[in-house]
Image (cartoon, rainbow, N blue to C red):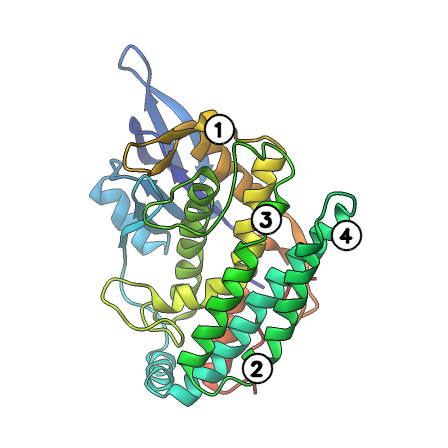
């Protein structure tokens, strides 16, 4: 079983990362211009370094990370992927060859895409029903009605005969689900109104939170796919597009409700973020403050450290391992070791 390692997030513009013996050290300039040690961790406890903006990492440190298979990713201030530093290409070339063959075959792609979207919709439904169970006095009837609609759509998803048909059902289910998401916000309702999903740019604080969480989740899934030898650029549902990690976007569909939406709702409902943590631009764009980003990343990391029992394997593991486990299961299916790909379902 793979060990759950940590991700080091660098958010400060004044941060500098260096290696000290067998540890990573993060230093930050104080008000007098002196470098002060802010963080130190063993190299073997870090799996990825994620920098928001192009923070100073020396070529020597990049080379060391490449040799030790420590990923380095650069995201912009919104969490959108910019670049990734790679070492020597690893992974089974036969596995990738089989992946490309499936991607070129719509029928074979559909065999993977259908269970992924079915899991996504089932996890949406689970989140709605969970809220209704936990808040029976304030949960409107529309939440239950939406969960029933999503349940009815699951059969249509299973019977989809083309990728376009599947994409249509997925879009319909997303509209139903996001139409009820505001009813799952139980605190700060006036400040965090959610009417519809807006992405580029996010037009309200709730959407800004979701976009940021989805971006760091996509980076984790991308890293997991690379680790098992799959090409994150070549997907089965999302079309191939230069610069887009299509397979990472495919696989993360299973985790959006579990590692994106639930964390967003907790941040708002537990008042870990407030309206003061957001900047509203004249263009309508909403940006997250640097302090709030740190709060979000802390909540995300804590969530990853929680333990669950994997619904397919029946083994206990940390939530942070889920992208790696699903990437491994997908690789096993592509190799022919599994009859079907078992996606991640909430329980």
* Disc sitting over residue 331 in the figure: none
In percent of width and height, residue 278 lies at: 42, 30
Q: Residue at x 45, y 74 (%)?
A: 168
Q: Residues within 10 Å of mark 1 (few under 14, many from 20)?
A: some
Q: Specify whether 54 is left or right of 285.
A: left
Q: Are marks 4 and 1 in contact (CB under 8 Å)?
A: no
Near-viewer residue (332 or 143): 143
Residue 133's disc number: 4
Which label belongs to residue 158? 2
Give the percent coordinates (x, y) of residue 178.
53, 55
Farthest top residue in view: 32
Classify residue 174 as left or right of residue 18: right
- Quarter of the figure that contains the C terminus: bottom right
The residue carrying pointer 3 sits among few (fewer than 14), some (14 to 19) or many (20 or more) residues within 10 Å by Cα, namely some
Whether 316 is drawn above or below 100: the answer is above
User: Residue shown at 57%/82% (left/top)?
Assistant: 158
Which of label 1 and label 3 is nearer to you?
1
35 to the left or right of 308? left
Q: Tell me the distance, in whole angstroms, between the alpha carbons under discs 1 and 2.
A: 41 Å
Q: Which mark is residue 275?
A: 1
Among numbered discs 1 and 2, the one appearing first in the sequence: 2
Query: Mark 3 sits on what residue?
Result: 262
Residues 44 and 105: in front is 105
């Amino acid at each position: 079983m793979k060990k759950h390692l940590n991700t080091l997030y660098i958010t400060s513009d004044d941060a500098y990362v260096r290696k000290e013996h067998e540890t990573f050290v993060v230093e930050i300039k104080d008000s007098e211009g002196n470098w002060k040690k802010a963080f130190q961790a063993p190299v073997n406890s870090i799996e990825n370094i994620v920098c928001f903006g192009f923070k100073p990492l020396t070529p020597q440190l990049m080379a060391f990370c490449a040799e030790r298979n420590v990923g380095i990713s650069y995201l912009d201030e919104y969490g959108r992927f910019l670049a990734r530093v790679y070492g020597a290409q690893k992974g089974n070339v036969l596995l990738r060859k089989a992946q490309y063959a499936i991607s070129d075959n719509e029928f074979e792609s559909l065999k993977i895409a259908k269970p992924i979207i079915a899991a996504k919709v089932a996890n949406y439904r689970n989140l709605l029903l969970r809220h209704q169970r936990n808040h029976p006095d304030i949960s409107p009837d529309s939440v239950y009605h939406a969960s029933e609609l999503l349940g009815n759509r699951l059969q249509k998803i299973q019977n989809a005969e083309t990728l376009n048909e599947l994409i249509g059902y997925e879009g319909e289910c997303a509209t139903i689900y996001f139409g009820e998401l505001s009813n799952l916000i139980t605190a700060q309702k006036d400040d965090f109104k959610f009417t519809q999903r807006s992405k580029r740019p996010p037009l309200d604080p709730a959407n800004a939170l979701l976009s940021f969480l989805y971006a760091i989740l996509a980076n984790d899934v991308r890293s997991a796919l690379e680790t098992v030898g799959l090409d994150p650029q070549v997907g089965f549902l999302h079309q191939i597009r230069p610069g887009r990690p299509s397979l990472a976007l495919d696989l993360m569909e299973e985790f959006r409700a579990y590692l994106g939406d639930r964390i967003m709702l907790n941040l708002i409902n537990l008042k870990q973020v407030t309206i003061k943590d957001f900047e509203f631009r004249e263009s309508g764009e909403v940006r997250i403050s640097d302090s709030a980003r740190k709060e979000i990343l802390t909540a995300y990391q804590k969530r990853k450290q929680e333990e669950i029992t994997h619904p397919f394997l029946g083994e206990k593991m940390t939530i942070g391992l889920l992208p790696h486990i699903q990437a491994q299961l997908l690789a096993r299916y592509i190799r022919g070791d599994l009859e079907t790909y078992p996606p991640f379902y909430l329980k």
